[in-house]
Image (spheres, rainbow, N blue to C red):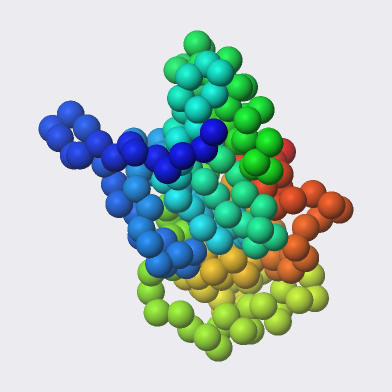
Amino acid sequence: MMQPSSRKVVHRSPTHSVWLLSLPHVQSDPVEAESSLEKDFVHLAALFHAVTSIKHQPFHLTTKVGGYTPDFLIGFRDRSQCVVEVKPQELLSGHEEKLADAAEHLRAHDLHFVLALDTSIRADDRHENALLLRRYAKGRVNTFSQGRLLETLSIGPQSVGKLRDLGFTIADLAQAVCHHKISLGANLRIDDDQEVFLVDKQVSTEGVSHAVQFERWLANS
């Protein structure tokens, strides 16, 4: 049984930090995060090309092994959704049965369950790459450069280095990534040899929902 969540984000204290994250490229409402790992996850998830909404602690689920409140509910362009549990790998032990039971119940509501571990969120410093891109994207958007960038990539992928040779800045690329126009791959690197692609405009790929694509992207597989 799914009910509105009654949990509230823990207030900031000398021993506990909380964040209210602004995601203007995704949604108007800020997203709450109760830990640095949740914060890193939100910054990363916001850059997946098909994400349209991120909601913290969206509901409470009653299962046969007790209650469960998910960390996040992610919405996508194809209207699929996934529930996300964010957890450090070292704290996973002992929670497997509860999470498996929650995943089973969620499937009955057409909700895909994703376990987001720190080993994926922070792999190859991708969380830091995500934050860097978001910082670059805070400046004023050059609409002319954005249009020229998309036109350039319409003929095929290009490396970051090649695009810089053509006069595009890192800010141009970051803004296009944040607005879900281009993709830098799962690691979000902006090295000169990184390939840059136009985002696939199709609702799904080979019958795979955006929720499942997101899980694979998060796992960098």
- Residue 74, horizontal then vertical, whole percent: 55, 50
Q: Is residue 92 above or below residue 123?
A: above
140, 96: nearer the viewer: 96
Residue, x 40% and y 79% (percent of image)? 140
- Residue 44, horizontal then vertical, whole percent: 50, 49
Q: Is residue 132 above or below residue 72?
A: below
Q: Is residue 108 above or below residue 77?
A: above
- Residue 146, horizontal then vertical, whole percent: 57, 80
The answer to which image quadrant residue 23 occupies is bottom left
The answer to which image quadrant residue 195 occupies is bottom right
Count of marks, rendered view: 0
38, 58: nearer the viewer: 58
53, 213: nearer the viewer: 53
Residue, far top:
94
Residue, x 56% and y 76% (percent of image)? 168
Residue, x 71% and y 79% (percent of image)? 152
Q: Is any part of residue 62 visible from this angle?
A: yes
